[in-house]
Amino acid sequence: MADEPMLLRVPGETRDVLAGDVLVDELADVIAGAMLLPRPPAVVTRQAAVLAARRVLGRLVARCAVEELPNLDRSPALALIAGERLRHLRKGYGAVHDDGQHPDGELTRMAIWYADDELSAMDWPGDLVGPSLPRRQGQVGDLVRAGSLLAAAIDQLGRKGWPL
């Protein structure tokens, strides 16, 4: 066991749910079932299961560090960039792909390509050719992709040990 408990970085609403009674009944059912399985017949009261559930959730709450997210409604651009980055992650363009396929600043060069509308497909810094080359998405779309690629480049630098 570690010397200090691990802190979980969670949005505020997650911590609020853990601190409230929303999950108590469901967790109490799981705990009651687990208490009955491998042991000789025992009487597990609902009250005991609820108490155990509250203790488990209390420990989780104690380890939650609420992560403040920017107020995205004040920056639609930030919301667009975050959405694009999440879309890329869902498609598999995460650490393994980025570090294996795009080392040594290539993500940054790709972001610059999207941000500079004067560069042509022939200037693309990646290894794509022909019909696989990226297409322009319009000024806003290109800047959103550039922002997403810059976020990926920053993540990559963090994995290389740069302080974030």
Image (spheres, helix red, strand yellow):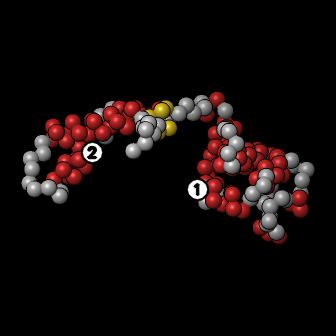
Question: Which of the numbered marks, if any, corresponds to residue 40?
Answer: none
Instruction: Find numbered disc 2 in the image and state the secondary structure of the residue it sits on.
Output: helix
Residue 41 appears anywhere in the view: yes
User: Mark 2 — residue?
Assistant: 26
The numbered mark, 2 or 1, whose residue comes first in the sequence reads 2
Image height of 14 relative to 153, above or below? above
Label 1 environment density (alpha carbons within 10 Å; few <14, some 14–19, many ≥20): few
Amino acid on which disc 2 is placed: Glu
Type of amino acid at the residue the image marks with label 1: Arg
Q: Please tell me in which quadrant of the rendered image residue 63 appears.
A: top left
Q: Pointer 2 and pointer 1: residues touching (CB < 8 Å)?
A: no
Q: Position of residue 22 (x, y in %)?
A: 31, 37
Q: Nearer the viewer, residue 136 or 91?
A: 91
- Of the pair 66 and 1, the residue shown nearer to us: 1
Identify the residue position indicated by label 1 in the image: 90
Q: Is residue 117 above or below residue 10?
A: below
- Give me the residue at 91% from left, 50% from top: 118
Residue drawn at point x = 67 percent, y = 45 percent: 161
